[in-house]
Image (tube, rainbow, N blue to C red):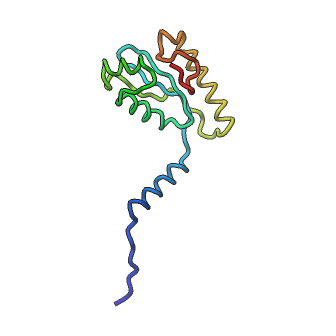
Amino acid sequence: MENEATVTPKTDRQRRKEWIELYKQARKTAGVYCIRNTVTGRVLLGSSVNLHGPFNRHRTELRLGSHRCPALQADWNRLGEDAFAFEVLDAVPAELAGLERDEALRQLEKKWLAAHQPLADRCYNTSEKIRVRQF
């Protein structure tokens, strides 16, 4: 009988550690997003250097009834989750990083804010600072 090398299966902890490391190494997409009220057309504009994260955070806050924007939370409570769409409006080119990425993101923010003026009529946002939310 030959000696067979035994392969030990990875533990859940080892797999989780590998997935976390892969996530950290993955290239993040920066850009501008919105949460659109499909009934009224009103939007909450936002931007992030990692577009994956904000959707999860906003959705969780809204489901828990603890969103930072009272008007958005009230509409969510009244109309329900199905009345809202989470959309990426624009993304920074993937090859940009660091200061170049940040400047490109600022330019995209300006573009989308200009397209939604006056803010009070078309947005849940009350400030033009969409990355540092002020509602």
Kindly give the residue lying farthest to the front in the view shown. 66
The percent coordinates of residue 77 (x first, y second) are 32, 21
Which quadrant would the N terminus be assigned to in this image? bottom left
Residue 31 in percent (x, y) is at: 55, 31
Task: In the rendered view, tell whether residue 52 sits above or below residue 69.
Answer: below
Query: At x 50% / y 22%, what residue is drawn?
Result: 45
Determine whether, in the image, residue 93 is placed left or right of residue 33: right
Image-based side of 92 in relation to 77, left or right: right
Q: Nearer the viewer, residue 93 or 63?
A: 63
* 120 with respect to 41 (left or right): right
Q: Residue at x 40, y 27 (%)?
A: 66
> Vertical placement of 31 versus 129: above or below?
below
Q: Is residue 26 above or below residue 43?
A: below
Task: Look at the picture and state if 23 lies above or below 45.
Answer: below
For the point 41% across and 16% down, the residue is 71
Q: Where does residue 46 sit, x and y in percent of width and height?
A: 52, 26
Measured from the top left, where is residue 2 in percent x and y? Answer: 37, 88
Residue, x 57% and y 26% (percent of image)?
Answer: 132
| Residue furthest out toward the bottom | 1
